[in-house]
Image (tube, rainbow, N blue to C red):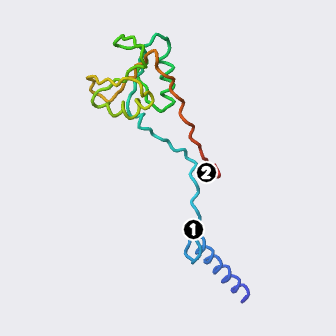
Amino acid sequence: MIVLIVVAVAVALGSVYAAAYFTGALPGSSPPDKPASCTPTTTTYASEQFVLNVYNASSGQGKAKETARALKANHFNVGVISNDPYKMKLTSVGQIRFGPKGEQNAKQYVHKLVPDAQLMADGRDDDSVDVVLGDAFPEIPSPSATPSTTPPGC
């Protein structure tokens, strides 16, 4: 009978010690790391916060659709894809059109991709931006791949 009591006390003390060790209550011990979440996180890019319309004013056909695809891959929120509503024919690189609310978007995000395009302020009231393709419009580079690290156990 005494042996059973001694064994029960030893098991209870061992359980209390183990619990204290794993919760970090004992000196030199630390609580276990929380398991990594396997829930994918979404990244919101600033260039997705405004509409970027793509218009073709070049002599080539299908250039707006091709450019819009590349801009979407670069995290732009592409709106209208069409021929230039002003019916201009541009032999230059092209234009970036914007209103007062879209000036920052045009300069900070779009002009970086097409630095030789002409910046053109117009009277629109929203923050949208138009990129108008001319004959010398360059190919939009593909975004650099972002390495994806998956937490262990996922």
Q: Position of residue 107 (x, y in %)?
A: 36, 32
- Amino acid type of the residue that numbered disc 2 sits on in the rendered structure: Pro
Towards the viewer: 91 or 67: 91
Q: Is there any visible trace of residue 82 in the rendered image?
A: no
Towards the viewer: 34 or 1: 34
Check the image and report above or below for 14 versus 46: below
Under circle 1, the secondary element is: loop
In the figure, residue 97 lies in which quadrant? Answer: top left
The CA distance from mark 2 to mark 1 is 19 Å
Q: Quadrant of the N terminus?
A: bottom right
Q: Residues within 10 Å of mark 2 (few under 14, many from 20)?
A: few
Q: Position of residue 61 (x, y in %)?
A: 49, 11
In the picture of the structure, the residue carrying the numbered disc 2 is 151
**Horizontal side of residue 100 vs 141, given as left or right:** left
Towards the viewer: 5 or 69: 69
In the figure, residue 34 lies in which quadrant? Answer: bottom right
In the figure, residue 87 lies in which quadrant? Answer: top left
**Horizontal side of residue 11 vs 72, given as left or right:** right
In the picture of the structure, the residue carrying the numbered disc 1 is 31
**Residue located at (51% from left, 44% from top):** 41
Q: Are marks 2 and 1 in contact (CB under 8 Å)?
A: no
